[in-house]
Image: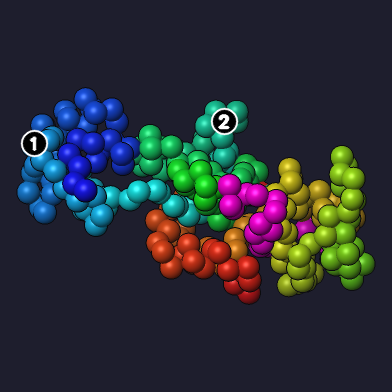
């Protein structure tokens, strides 16, 4: 089913219908390399490509994003001490309602997934789905065998009725752990490591499900997740 250009742009986060109409009428929207100043011309959404102010876009029913979160950014729309991660995204993504899937602390870096697909967000965050999240954890004190075994067997956190165990935990070096958790409890990794008698000094998320943060994605950068990435995410075995 074809859709008017004005409605297409609205669905992609370019503002109200009136704002999209104004954008189109001012000649800032190109389709097939040519300015299209008729807001009512119709296009097939699937595969539709266009530019706005020379920035290329492709129609997407939903947005699925991976952001490399830098330190000193907050995962909130109303940050208190640092800028919001949403300032790292182009305006249309925020306007169309892209949300962080879970939160990373302001000092945590690494992979943050974002989407405007409520069902997808629910699947990624539901405790029942047990999606593994893999962290590189730099610790203050030397990591010993007792700490590894406590993290593997389960540690009791304040306000929790039963112990929380790492799905996987290995020592990479004296002060570096690779830790996988399937829950998303508040400050979970920091609290687990503290409960195992050590302390987190840096935390970096390297993978969620089978999707690993690409080395090419630098802090502050974001990328679209394509079908293959989403399929990788659904895999239960995170990249080693
Ligand atoms: N666990 C934490 O303690 N902090 C994070 O940001 C993520 C997981």
Residue that badge 1 annotates: 38
Task: Quote the CA–CA distance across marks 2 and 1.
Answer: 40 Å
In the rendered view, would you say 136 is above or below 49?
A: below
Q: Earlier in the sequence, mark 2 or mark 1?
A: 1
Residue that badge 2 annotates: 79
Q: Point out the frontmost of discs 2 and 1.
A: 1
How many marks overall? Answer: 2
Identify the residue shown where x is 40% and y is 49%.
Answer: 63
In the rendered view, would you say 81 is above or below 59?
A: above
Residue 81, quarter of the rendered image: top right
Would you say residue 139 sits in the magenta stretch? yes
Magenta segment range? 122-142
**Whether the residue under disc 1 has CB within 8 Å of ligand 1:** no
Q: Residues within 10 Å of mark 1 (few under 14, many from 20)?
A: some
Where is residue 156? Give x, y as percent: 90, 51
Image-based side of 192 in relation to 90, left or right: right
Mark 1: which secondary structure?
Answer: loop
Q: Is residue 56 visible?
A: no
Given the current orientation, which residue lies at the most extreme top position? Answer: 18
Q: Residues within 10 Å of mark 2 (few under 14, many from 20)?
A: few
Mark 2: which secondary structure?
Answer: loop
Q: How is the image coloured?
A: rainbow
Image-based side of 173 in relation to 28, left or right: right
Image-based side of 121 in relation to 147, left or right: left
Image-based side of 68 in relation to 92, left or right: right
Where is residue 183? Give x, y as percent: 72, 53
Where is residue 74? Give x, y as percent: 58, 38
Depth order, front residue of 145/130: 130
Where is residue 32? Give x, y as percent: 11, 54
Given the current orientation, which residue lies at the most extreme front position? Answer: 1
Identify the residue shown where x is 38% and y is 37%.
Answer: 96
Do residues under tags 2 and 1 come within 8 Å of each other at their CB atoms?
no
């Amino acid at each position: 089913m074809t859709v008017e250009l004005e409605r297409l742009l609205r669905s992609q986060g370019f503002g109200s219908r009136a704002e999209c109409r104004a954008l189109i009428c001012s000649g800032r929207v190109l389709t097939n390399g040519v300015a299209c100043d008729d807001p009512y011309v119709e296009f097939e959404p699937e595969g539709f490509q266009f530019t706005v102010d020379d920035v290329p876009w492709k129609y997407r029913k939903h947005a699925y994003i991976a952001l490399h979160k830098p330190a000193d950014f907050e995962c909130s729309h109303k940050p208190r001490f640092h800028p919001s991660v949403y300032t790292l995204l182009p305006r249309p993504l925020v306007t169309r309602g892209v949300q962080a899937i879970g939160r990373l602390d302001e000092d945590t870096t690494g992979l943050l997934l974002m989407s405007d697909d409520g069902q997808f967000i629910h699947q990624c965050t539901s405790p029942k789905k047990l999606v593994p999240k893999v962290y590189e954890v730099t610790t203050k004190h030397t990591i010993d065998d007792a700490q590894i075994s406590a993290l593997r067997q389960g540690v009791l956190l304040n306000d929790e009725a039963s112990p929380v165990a790492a799905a996987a935990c290995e020592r990479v070096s004296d002060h570096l752990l690779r830790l996988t958790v399937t829950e998303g409890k508040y400050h979970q990794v920091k609290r687990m490591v503290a409960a195992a008698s050590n302390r987190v000094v840096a935390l970096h998320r390297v993978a969620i499900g089978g999707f690993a943060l690409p080395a090419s994605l630098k802090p502050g950068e974001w990328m679209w997740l394509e079908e293959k990435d989403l399929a990788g995410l659904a895999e239960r075995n995170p990249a080693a």
